């Protein structure tokens, strides 16, 4: 069996060689190469490396074998340093823990925030809203720890600040106005409040059902992908219509929260979340269609029959 000698160059400064890896077997994987690079360059941990065949090419998958890369015996690869990394699970736990604790602070109406008006009576919608917010982010924390299986182990460290800024900032924005002593109850009174509450609860259950189904598609410790199909739970029937019903249910939950509270800040948060989730859903939808030739053609990305 012939062995490879692979010279690794900086993807940004292509004239700069980083390291040469000798005696590489054809059945070694890209991940094996990353480990050997990390041994020689301790500052380049495995999670920081993206190896490419071309400086601006697509990152090679960890499971790809050297013999399948069509490299000459004295081959070249290009490495992009992804910078400091942090675990996806860690980021999710921190970004969701913030709103879980931030929202109730405003509900308790400290005089430091609201002044002397903090003692005014609290409306029914406001009481239900704090329970809904706490349930939502408590569920997110539970799912992150016990349900989600992440295909990628890490993300850039700076994403922590971006994600936390989004979730923590919007939470404080929404909570400040919903819990304000001058808050006005919804126009249609209890009917509007409880219709919104019912929609929120059903959407949260739907979201959880989809996350459980997606978890069961991927055996622990693998990156296996399958076409998600309904599993008997009526909430998962949404997979017959869209590729990402978990996002659809998420949007419906916050739309219902907006109806329940009749709050403009909540509506802005819902709109911002929907915009981002459309992008994620469309990317996943395209990936499914590329990967699975038999992917259901009637499905749309996030909104049935529309988007």
Image (tube, rainbow, N blue to C red):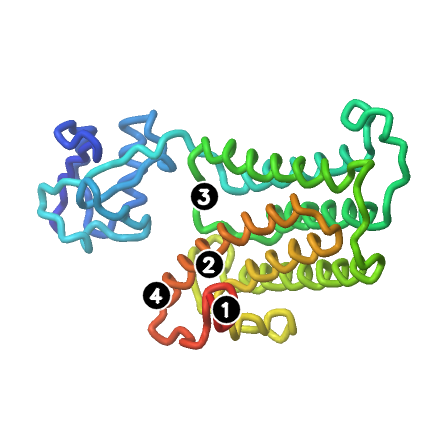
When asked about the image quadrant of residue 245, the answer is bottom right
- Point 68% across, 62% down: residue: 205
**Between marks 3 and 4, how big is the CA–CA gap?**
21 Å
Disc 2 to disc 3: CB gap under 8 Å: no
**Mark 3 residue element:** loop
Near-viewer residue (141 or 180)? 180
Crowdedness of circle 3 by 10 Å Cα count: few (<14), some, many (20+)? few
Which numbered disc covers residue 291?
4
**Mark 4 residue element:** helix
Quickly name the residue at label 3: 153
Marked residue nearer the N-terminal end (3 or 1): 3
Marked residue nearer the N-terminal end (4 or 1): 1
In the image, which is nearer the foreground, mark 2 or mark 4?
2
- Point 45% across, 54% down: residue: 280
Disc 4 to disc 1: CB gap under 8 Å: no
**Between marks 3 and 1, how big is the CA–CA gap?**
27 Å
Disc 2 to disc 1: CB gap under 8 Å: yes
Quickly name the residue at label 2: 281
Quickly name the residue at label 1: 242
């Amino acid at each position: 069996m012939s062995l490879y000698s692979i010279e690794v160059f900086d993807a940004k400064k292509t004239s700069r060689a980083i390291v040469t890896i000798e005696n590489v077997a054809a059945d070694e994987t890209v991940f094996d190469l990353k480990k050997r690079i990390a041994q020689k360059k301790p500052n380049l941990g495995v999670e920081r490396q993206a190896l490419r065949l071309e400086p601006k090419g697509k990152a090679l998958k960890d499971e790809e074998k050297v013999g399948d890369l069509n490299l000459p015996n004295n081959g070249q690869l290009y490495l992009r340093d992804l910078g400091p990394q942090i675990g996806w699970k860690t980021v999710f736990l921190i970004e969701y823990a913030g709103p879980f604790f931030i929202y109730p602070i405003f509900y308790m109406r400290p005089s430091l925030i609201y002044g002397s008006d903090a003692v005014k009576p609290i409306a029914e919608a406001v009481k239900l809203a704090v329970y809904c917010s706490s349930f939502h982010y408590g569920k997110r924390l539970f799912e992150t720890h016990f349900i989600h299986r992440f295909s990628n182990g890490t993300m850039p460290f700076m994403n922590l600040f971006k994600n936390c800024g989004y979730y923590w900032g919007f939470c404080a924005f929404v909570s400040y106005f919903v819990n304000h002593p001058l808050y006005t109850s919804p126009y249609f009174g209890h009917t509007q409040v409880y219709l919104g509450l019912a929609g929120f609860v059903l959407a949260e259950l739907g979201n959880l059902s989809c996350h459980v189904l997606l978890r069961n598609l991927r055996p622990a410790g693998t990156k296996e992908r399958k076409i998600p199909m309904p599993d008997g739970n009526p909430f998962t029937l949404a997979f017959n219509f869209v590729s990402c019903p978990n996002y659809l249910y998420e949007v419906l939950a916050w739309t219902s929260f907006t109806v329940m509270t009749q709050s403009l800040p909540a509506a802005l948060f819902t709109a911002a979340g929907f915009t981002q989730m459309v992008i994620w859903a469309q990317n996943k939808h395209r990936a499914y269609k590329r990967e699975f030739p038999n992917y259901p053609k009637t499905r749309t990305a996030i909104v049935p029959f529309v988007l």
